[in-house]
Image (tube, rainbow, N blue to C red):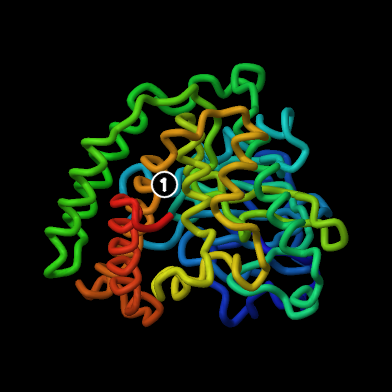
Amino acid sequence: MPTGSSTEEPGLRSRADSVPLDWDAVRAHLAAHGHRLDADPPPRQFAGGLANLNYLIHLDGKPAVLRRPPMGELPAGAYDMAREFRILSRLPDALPFIARGLHLCDDPSVIGQRFQIIEYRPGLVIREHLPPDLAHRPEIGARLSQVLLETIAAIHAVDTRAVGLDDLGRPEGFLARGVSGWRKRGLAAMEDGTEALHKDVGAWLEANLVPDGPPGLLHNDFKLNNIILDPETFAPRAVVDWDQGTRGDPLFDFATLLSYWIHADDPPAMHDMEQMPAVEACLCSRQDAVAAYGRMSGRDMSDFRFHRVLAMYKLAVIFLQLGLRWRSGATQDRRYAAFTGYGTGILEFTHEIAQGRAF
């Protein structure tokens, strides 16, 4: 959910480059539910992303965001608009930096998939590179580090019962299911010649499995480009992309953030994936981030290496799954061509972390 509302705003695609939707069908659906989809200005798709499609619309005279899954057949349980809408319709009662869900279309026949409409929060989104006007501000690294850590700690501190989300997900056995599930997915998507590496990492995870910590609310893909920031103070205006939200061990969610938190001397694949400009922004070290999160959350970090390895393995497998789409011919999008190499490189780094030779 990028920023800005002007039709000239660079975070918006041109109408010619936007994935078309049946806006007449959307308009009719919304009218039946007491809402007006304005024709002027016309809907525009936000740029960026490989998955969900987001559009800036005007609903009842105010800007809003229409969000739907990607085109084509979807994996079971993925891109769950109903789950995300449930979270976004309740979580703003606990956290001011959550954009509220306004409407869920639970009828896939309207545009081919369920979709939702979310409150629009304009602001600054920092993607794979630091904006040039921020690159020479000496305080930016410390400030962004603070925002990332304080924001994820606040999410993990939410009383899910108080906001009606206490039955979200299955916290019991969360980590064990993660190990089993990602091992199976990894072997299914692996690059030829890497089976031994997958088995070594998987065996390490099985042997070092730790008990689930006290459950909390998880974002499951929390990183810098999923936060809309105040461009002056860098305070969070919105945390977006909640379609994987659940409850489970918050240390795994924190480890997911840390998997994008690269150091200058990390292997090339960690830099090539371009998920978060940690080096450009001069974020604090991963070790300092772990210590700070432990202080903020009050959680015991002594077994954190397990969560770190599991989150890194998940990241490797995700890139391998994306790369498999290219290798199998399921997509012709050349952005996917390099993903197998990224996944294998991240897997090799994960093995180093598991063996205690890296952090």
Q: Residue at x 29, y 71 (%)?
A: 340
Q: Residue at x 65, y 61 (%)?
A: 283
In the rendered view, tell whether residue 133 sits above or below residue 277: below
Tell which of 281 and 290 is nearer to you: 290
Viewport quadrant of the N terminus: bottom right
SS class, disc 1: helix
Task: Determine the image quadrant of residue 94.
Answer: top right
Classify residue 302 as left or right of residue 7: left
Q: Quadrant of residue 233?
A: bottom right
Q: Amino acid at mark 1?
A: Arg
Apparent side of residue 27 relative to residue 188 in the rendered image (left or right): right
Kindly give the residue lying farthest to the front in the view shown. Answer: 357
**47 horizontally vs 100: left or right:** left
Does 301 appear above or below 357?
above
* Residue ranking furthest to the right: 232
Residue bearing the label numbered 1: 308
Q: Position of residue 235 (x, y in %)?
A: 80, 51
Q: Residues within 10 Å of mark 1 (few under 14, many from 20)?
A: many
- Left or right, 182 with reference to 144: left
Residue at the (40%, 26%) spot, across then down: 212
